[in-house]
Image (cartoon, grey):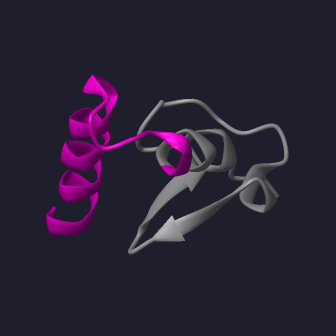
């Protein structure tokens, strides 16, 4: 039997602890590292819009 490890939809990396190192949003996976970055990013930061676009892509595709 093969183990299937998730791949983060935002950074494209496989988290070290697999499914236990992030959360699912719809049918997509977001790693805990990206989750922390999303939560600490302020609305006026340039990275904020990138995260918003990624989350929209995850939700609506």
Query: What's the residue at 77%, 50% (across, down)?
Result: 18
Q: Nearer the viewer, residue 55 or 8?
A: 55
Q: Split into 4 quadrants, where in the image is the C terminus?
A: bottom left
Is residue 57 part of the magenta span, yes or no?
A: yes
Question: How many circles with numbers are drawn on the protein?
Answer: 0
| Highlighted range, magenta | 39-61
Please determine whether, in this image, residue 27 is positioned above or below residue 4: below
Q: Residue furthest left?
A: 60
Task: State the residue in front, 20 or 56.
Answer: 56
For image coordinates 72% across by 39% down, the residue present is 15
Q: Nearer the viewer, residue 26 or 47?
A: 47
Taking the view exactly as shown, the residue that stands out farthest to the bottom is 26
Left or right of 37? Residue 22 is right
Residue at 57% over, 50% down:
35
**Where does residue 27 sit, x and y in percent of width and height?**
41, 70
**Residue 51 part of the magenta-drawn span:** yes
| Residue 58 as seen in the image, left or right of residue 30 | left
The image quarter containing residue 50 is top left
Counting from the top left corner in percent of width and height, residue 21 is at: 76, 53
- Residue 37 in picture, x, y percent from top left: 55, 38
Report the predominant secondary structure element of the magenta stretch.
helix
Residue 12 in picture, x, y percent from top left? 48, 31
Q: Quadrant of the N terminus?
A: bottom right
């Amino acid at each position: 039997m093969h183990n299937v490890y998730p791949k983060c939809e935002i950074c494209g990396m496989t988290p070290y602890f697999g499914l236990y190192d992030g959360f699912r949003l719809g049918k997509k996976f977001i790693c805990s590292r990206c989750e922390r970055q999303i939560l600490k990013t302020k609305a006026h930061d340039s990275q904020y819009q990138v995260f918003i676009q990624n989350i929209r892509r995850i939700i609506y595709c």
